[in-house]
């Protein structure tokens, strides 16, 4: 009755359930009950190991080494552990590290404190130190490249905006005189007084004249 009560609200390995029952019953009694529960399929270490490993990989994001440790701590036999680990042999530790870093630590990796925090967290999950350092370094390089590309895009956008402003002013105020050198010089001086650079003005002016 005690065993059925315990199993009614959670799963146990044979070892875990045996430890709970041993608090109140003799060793021989406990072993007989455990044998009978196995016969009935109410405790099944192999099935427990698979479900536990699946959750440790997908929910807690443990590395294989840490999963093995957890299964052993719960009393799973070494052979059962190796059998169930075969089911997850396609687990990509490098990709898992990247996903954890991007999801939880990307915003803090630029600071040393943030990198130490991420490193310690991944170590606790069972990942190898060299793999963690390598992926942090790679992610930082990628973030730097993306920041530089974004900066270049912003600069290009600003340049296009300035050129559009110059074009608008030239066509609005000086379009009728741009065909003469005197008029072009007047337009250039006028826009330079507004703070625009000579090179930008000249480039846009030439584009307008070529279009015409």
Image (cartoon, rainbow, N blue to C red):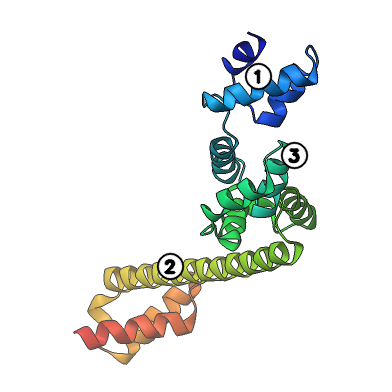
Q: Earlier in the sequence, mark 3 or mark 1?
A: 1
Mark 3 sits on what residue? 73
Q: How many marks?
A: 3
In terms of secondary structure, where does tag 2 sit?
helix
Q: CA distance from mark 2 to mark 1?
A: 75 Å
In terms of secondary structure, where does tag 1 sit?
helix
User: Which residue corresponds to the image point at 49% horizontal and 78% vertical from the top-left?
Assistant: 197
Of the residues tagged 2 and 3, which is closer to the observer? 3
Counting other residues with Cα less than 10 Å from the Cα at mark 1, is it few (<14), some (14-19), or many (20 or more)?
A: some
Q: Position of residue 91 (x, y in %)?
A: 54, 57
Counting other residues with Cα less than 10 Å from the Cα at mark 3, is it few (<14), some (14-19), or many (20 or more)?
A: few
Would residue 199 be visible to someone looking at this image?
yes
Location of residue 143 by image quarter: bottom right
Would residue 183 be visible to someone looking at this image?
no
User: Which residue corresponds to the image point at 40% horizontal and 67% vertical from the top-left?
Assistant: 161
In terms of secondary structure, where does tag 3 sit?
helix
The N terminus - image quarter: top right
Q: Is residue 128 above or below residue 120?
A: below
Of the residues tagged 2 and 1, which is closer to the observer? 1
Mark 1 sits on what residue? 33
Location of residue 131 by image quarter: bottom right
State the residue in front, 3 or 90.
Answer: 3
Q: Earlier in the sequence, mark 2 or mark 3?
A: 3
Considering every residue shown, the one lying at the far bottom of the view is 181
Mark 2 sits on what residue? 157
Tell whether 118 sits left or right of 80. Answer: right
Q: Position of residue 125 (x, y in %)?
A: 70, 48
State the residue in front, 55 or 37.
Answer: 37
């Amino acid at each position: 009755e005690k065993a059925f009560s315990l199993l009614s609200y959670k799963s146990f390995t044979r070892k875990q359930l045996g430890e709970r029952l041993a608090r109140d019953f003799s060793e021989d009694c406990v072993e007989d009950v455990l044998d009978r529960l196995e016969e009935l399929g109410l405790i099944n270490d192999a099935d427990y190991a698979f479900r536990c490993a699946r959750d440790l990989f997908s929910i807690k994001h443990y590395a294989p080494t840490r999963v093995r440790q957890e299964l052993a701590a719960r009393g799973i036999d070494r052979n059962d552990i190796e059998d169930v680990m075969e089911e997850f042999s396609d687990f990509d530790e490098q990709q898992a590290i990247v996903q954890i870093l991007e999801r939880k630590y990307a915003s803090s990796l630029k600071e040393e404190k943030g990198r130490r925090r991420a490193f310690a967290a991944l170590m606790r999950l069972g990942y190898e130190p060299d793999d963690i350092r390598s992926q942090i370094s790679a992610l930082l390089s990628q973030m730097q490249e993306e920041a530089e590309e974004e900066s270049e895009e912003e600069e290009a956008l600003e340049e296009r905006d300035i050129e559009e402003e110059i074009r608008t002013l030239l066509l609005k105020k000086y379009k009728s005189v741009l065909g003469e050198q005197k008029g072009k010089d007047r337009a250039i001086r006028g826009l330079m007084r507004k703070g625009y650079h000579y090179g930008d003005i000249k480039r846009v002016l030439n584009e307008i004249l070529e279009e015409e």
